[in-house]
Image (cartoon, helix red, strand yellow):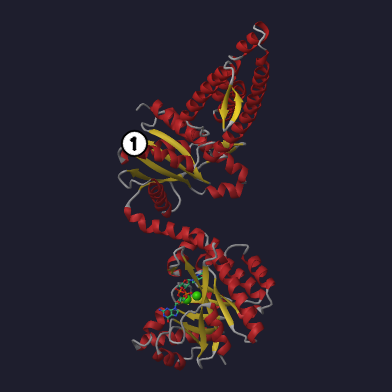
Amino acid sequence: MTKQAENNRVDRTLQKLQNKREAPKSAFILLLLLFVIANAATATMANTHGEFNMFGAPVDYSAMAGVFSMLGNICLICIALLFGKTGFITAFLLIVVQFPGLVLNIFVRHNYASIPGLFSNLLIALAITIIHIGNRKITAYQAGIRKQAVTDRLTGLPNRFACGELLQDYLKRFERFAVITVDLNNFKNINDTMGHDTGDKVLCEIASRFKALANSMTTGTRDFVARSTADEFVIVLHDGDTPAAVERTIDAYRSELERKITLDDCDYYTTACFGYAMFPDHTDKIETLLTYADAAVHEAKRHGAGSRVVQFNSDFLASNNSLEIERKIRSALTNDQILCNLQPQYDMEHHLRGFEVLARMKDSNGNYISPVDFIPVAERTGLVDRIDMRMFEMSVEFLDKVLKETGKRITLSSNISVRHLMKNNIIEQIRKVLDRYDVPPELIELEITESIMIDSPEKAMQRIDELREIGLKIAIDDFGTGYSSLSYLNNFPANLLKIDKSFIDNMNLNDSSRQYVAMIISIGHTLDLEVISEGVEAKDQVDALKDIGCDYIQGFVWGKPLPLDKAYELVSSSV
Ligand code: C2E
Ligand code: CA
Ligand code: CA
């Protein structure tokens, strides 16, 4: 197929998507046939004298002429109504051709019985003209809506839906093609620093460059460009039978993209990552193909900024799995399927101190997905803020209920991811939740891992101070697994230190591990921090921790994470 023919085909597919579906041609022929029969019957009846018997009553033949004439008119109205412009012209012509006969009858043959026919034809002509005008308005409106449904508003390129339809078309013919996902690098920076208007203009410029290149037929492949989401484009290419051919085309798009963009006297430089998957080499399913191209670009982006091209490889399915998890998190957040479990914390005398709040996620099949799997994905995709805040709100709500109904002052510890903590709006988010409940903030603890001190300790410290000003307590989570130096720890304005399970696991295996835990506890106490050991599973660990002065214990030995109602029962029955 020539490139021109291919472009025509793309246009036809898009056109097909935009066009209104009309009634089938067979209906048109049937209506026309019915009209001819009705007209012939009208003429026959009008010229037949006498009566016939209908259900025992005598009926004049000429009266039946009116019935058939009406039937003919209904056919014309249906044709005008159902078949747009063609229908209107056909119906109009069919009326017009009857006029000479009617006029001849009345004025030459003086057959005045044709006068009602003349008037009824004039009225039908008026009726179908009105129908046609109305139809045109509706059709124009519908065409606008359909166009919007397949076109990206900002750039005017076809959207992802149109792209999927085109791929279906290719698939039916079982032709070889490749799908490329183009993800712009650091596009957010342009939006953040220059504003969304500029960001939009940059996207439009890139779109028009891509479109011009696709139409120029110079890439050696036949290409179709669509915009899929904010800063992502999809290119479908034909005739790129080998990875080398696909990558040559990608190079052409990359050069277009990386050329300087000048807007309002400012120069912008953009780069992108490209991921591609080939049909049928990688999969023969459209949706999977798009997902594979996304997984490839995801892989390209994983290695940081820079322009990269990656071909899909089944090894990416693990990261593809993270796309799946991301989808599940989004859906769980919308459908309220992020729940929490509370794991009890006790002092060394086995009195309840409070609970750690742990997120749980149910997918649409009702299966639980472990936070070990979904929290890292949520952190990468920025969704963790929403999870953390949901958990925080649930803890405050639970605490409010406990205080009101039992009067017991327990502590609830909620996890806050480092990434979330560094966001500027976190303080405001927390204040808003606290304002809604009547809960003393000192009964709420936020668990933050010590890794917070690695990247920007000053900012971290300031943020923690702000949380302390609200009155909240701070726990250093997973202590011992990070790399924070003692001097940082000295400045970490925390209340509690949580010794990571890995140290507790080893503590009774040899003396030095036990001394190590003892040393952490004593450092904690020197820094004026209380110390809790987590992941305590055995009675002998409890005994050892008592001996070396640990303050609290959290672990399966005294309690697993519980659903809210069971946790409530535990508080009610605790002394
Ligand atoms: P984490 O904060 O260190 O939480 C403790 C984890 O250890 C929990 O696993 C808990 O169920 C488990 N655990 C407690 N005691 C024992 C024990 O005796 N034996 C064993 N084998 N495990 C014990 P979980 O609930 O699977 O949570 C895993 C991690 O997910 C958490 O580790 C935390 O890093 C993260 N996470 C959970 N909920 C949230 C949340 O709401 N926000 C954020 N940012 N992270 C969360
Ligand atoms: Ca924790
Ligand atoms: Ca922990």
Residue 48 in sight in this render: yes
Residue 518 in the figure: left or right of residue 403: left
The quadrant in which residue 137 appears is top right
Q: Please state which of residues 28 and 292 is positioned toward the viewer in this rendering.
A: 28
The answer to which quarter of the image holds residue 516 is bottom left
Relative placement, left or right, of 59 versus 453 is right
User: Where 32 sits versus 169, above or below?
Assistant: above
Reply above or below: 470 against 128: below
Residue at the (36%, 55%) spot, across then down: 316
- Report the residue at 55% width, 20% height from top: 39
Q: Residue 86: x percent and y percent?
A: 54, 23
Q: Residue 36: x and y, percent?
A: 52, 21
Q: Residue at x 66, y 66 (%)?
A: 428
Q: Indicate whether 407 appears above or below 250.
A: below
Label 1 crowd bin: few (<14), some (14–19), many (20+), radius 10 Å: few
Residue furthest top as drawn: 108
Residue situated in front as seen by the camera: 247 or 211: 211
Residue occupied by mark 1: 173
- Where, quadrant-wise, is the C terminus in this rendering? bottom right
Task: List the single residue furthest toward the front.
Answer: 56
- Tell me, yes or no, if residue 267 can be seen here: no
Residue 433 percent coordinates (x, y): 65, 70
Q: How many marks?
A: 1
Residue 238 x %, y %: 36, 35
* Residue type, label 1: Arg
**Dot 1: element:** helix
Q: Which quarter shows the N terminus?
A: top left
User: Does the Cβ of the disc 1 residue fall within 8 Å of ligand 1?
Assistant: no
Q: Name the side, left or right, on which 423 lies relative to 485.
A: right
